[in-house]
Image: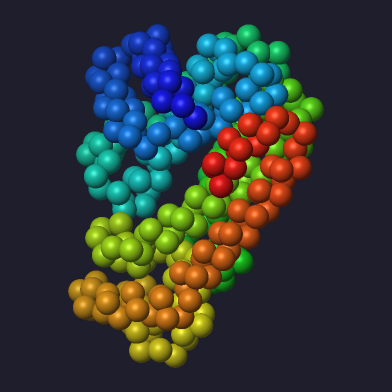
Amino acid sequence: MSLDINNRLYAAMLEILETYVTNEKMKKQLYEFIKFKQNEGYLFGDLVILHYLIYKNKIEDQIIKVAAAIELLILSFDILDDVEDQDNLSSPWIRQQSLSLNISSYLIFLCHLIIVESDFKNKYKALELLVTKALCSIEGQHLDLLNDIPSEDQYIEMVILKSGSLAELACLIGTILADPDKAHEVQLYGSSIGVIGQIQNDIEGMKSWDKKNDILNKKFTLPILFLLSVEQNHKVTEKIRNYYNGLIKQNEILILSKDIDSLLEETGAFLYSKVTQQLYRNKAESSIMSLTINRIYKEALLKYI
């Protein structure tokens, strides 16, 4: 979406803080969190607004406020994810984790309240959808935290729950508030947007050997699972398994970092991830192009895949 929409979403989030948050210390922390997230853009809020625009053909202040509330909900999930995974130590909510967890709980209910207080005819349908998809995402996060995913197929199932549900939530909230009869069309591609993004994160998560590296954090992601499955008897993959099982130290893996990088390329682990990503991209594109909407809106949707 445009820079103007991003600015309006940011302003709406700040206005929400001023209106609803009475504790000044909590408000100050939330300002910091929102500012930290600003450079990432507002994917989920954008999706809410775009889908409302597609099916209502206008943008109202109310939908901006709801979209801002959805961004605050996503912020609450980001806080939980980072505290649970401990793999993004640069985020400001890591510093005082007990307070951050409390803020995360607050944001979930605040998002609910903002939708309840809106004047949208279909707001309770939107709320039911929000709760359903949020629960799916939390279940997916639980599977991710268990870190007991033996195959690529099961990993994709987890990603559909964890990431796909949130992208689908954003698309469907905007659609339902505009025209709930169109929700079935959006479900065909909404989840794929989240899967595409998560696979991209998987690829990026292996490009550097810092604190966010997925192998160092003993995570099972798509390229790692593929590598372990096709090179079961390789000495390097055996070291990785031993590290995951706590039999060797992290420094032994760091020594092998260049070998692991080479193996990820040679085995086609990255290629497999990109092909899988492209399959979901093709699926989403086919669904988007079949919509009976203005071509300009189709082109706008395609930018998210």
Q: Is residue 218 left or right of residue 253?
A: right
Which one is nearer the viewer's eye here, 240 or 63?
A: 63
Where does the image place residue 67, in percent across and percent down from the top left?
52, 24
The answer to whether one can see residue 304 in this image is yes
Which one is nearer the viewer's eye here, 152 or 106?
A: 152
Where does the image place residue 81, in percent across and percent down from the top left?
40, 45
Instruction: Name the residue at 61% across, 49% down.
Output: 192
Colour mode? rainbow
Q: Is residue 76 left or right of residue 155?
A: left
Disc tally is 0
Residue 4 higher or lower than 215, as above or below: above
Q: Residue furthest front?
A: 295
Where does the image place residue 155, in percent across and percent down from the top left?
55, 62
Residue 207 in which image quadrant? bottom left
Instruction: Name the residue at 46% across, 55% down.
Output: 200
Instruction: Name the residue at 41% across, 76% down.
Output: 265
The answer to whether one can see residue 9 in this image is no
Instruction: Name the residue at 29% across, 33% down.
Output: 36
Residue 104 in which image quadrant? top left
Which one is nearer the viewer's eye here, 89 or 271?
A: 271
Residue 256 higher or lower than 211, as above or below: below
Residue 256 higher or lower than 65, as above or below: below
Where does the image place residue 208, in percent across and percent down from the top left?
28, 63
